[in-house]
Image (spheres, helix red, strand yellow):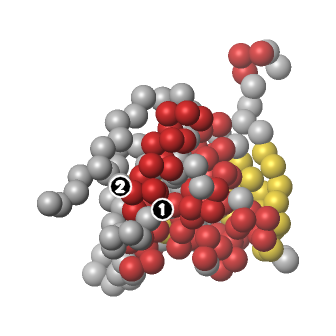
Amino acid sequence: MSQGQEQPSETAKSSTEARAELYALVKAAEEDGVTTLIHKRDDRALLAPLDRFPAARQAGTFPSHVLSAAQKDFGDLISRAAHGEPQVLRRSRTPVAVLLPVDANLATHSSDPATAAAAPAGGAVNSQGTQSRGSAPRRLATLGDAIGSVLASGPSGGPTFGLPGLDAATGGLQPGLLTLVAAPPAGGGSLLGLAAARQTALVDGRKVLYAVVTRV
């Protein structure tokens, strides 16, 4: 194999390991094309990049979940995917990866959702598109989903607060988003902003503007 034709790698994880490392595995799939084989007892599924299943990019065709919700229900999603029902993983509203049955064949790689839904049972995927348009189940966003859509991207590689516990919980400061820190007087809001500014300027070596607005 020539140097210019390297194929994306594949790794294997238990469902417990994959749940804990979900953000990193999705990032590896999204950026490096890495596919992860995930096993849960007798169920096996692939966490794969979207290029392996382009139909997952079609909104509303398959069940989809923001990463925070997917992490909570990960074992159930693995079982569903293993039994032929692809599960799309989203960062906010954007599909970033997909859980597929291990034996999904090349017919399911079509960008046409109808073709994917018609795949034979040997490597079958069961699409919600096979149901009538009026009877397709709808899932209301919960408060957890709404919060998860903001936090689901995990560590962003952008600025952080410099506080490991807080950065792990929030994913740091997300590029392109305005982050508001609200606190009562003497509640530490300014210190939190100062910690982020210090981390950005002194540790990360980036330019930062730190300003405090107070009421008179």
- The x and y percentages for residue 210 are 35, 41
> Dot 1: within a 10 Å radius of its alpha carbon, few (fewer than 14), some, or many (20 or more) residues?
many
Q: Residue at x 40, y 34 (%)?
A: 208
Q: Which quarter of the picture shows residue 75?
A: bottom right
Which residue extends farthest front? 216
Kindly state the secondary structure of the residue where label 2 is placed. Answer: loop
Rendered residue at 72%/21% (across/down) = 5
Which residue in the structure is indicated by mark 2? 179
Q: Is the residue marked by circle 2 packed among few (<14), some (14-19), or many (20+) residues within 10 Å? A: few
Q: Residue at x 61, y 78 (%)?
A: 73
Amino acid tagged 1: Leu
Instruction: Identify which residue, 59 or 120, lies in the foreground.
Output: 59
Q: Is residue 197 above or below residue 166?
A: above
Indicate the position of residue 151 as horizontal and vertical percent values. 48, 62
Q: Nearer the viewer, residue 157 or 188?
A: 188
Disc 1 to disc 2: CB gap under 8 Å = no
Counting the numbered discs, the total is 2
Q: Which structural element holds mark 1?
A: helix
Residue located beneath label 1 in the image: 151
Report the side of 24 relative to 169 (left or right): right
Q: Nearer the viewer, mark 1 or mark 2?
A: 2
Q: Can you see residue 78?
A: yes
- Residue 80 relative to residue 64: left or right: right
Residue type indicated by callout 2 = Thr
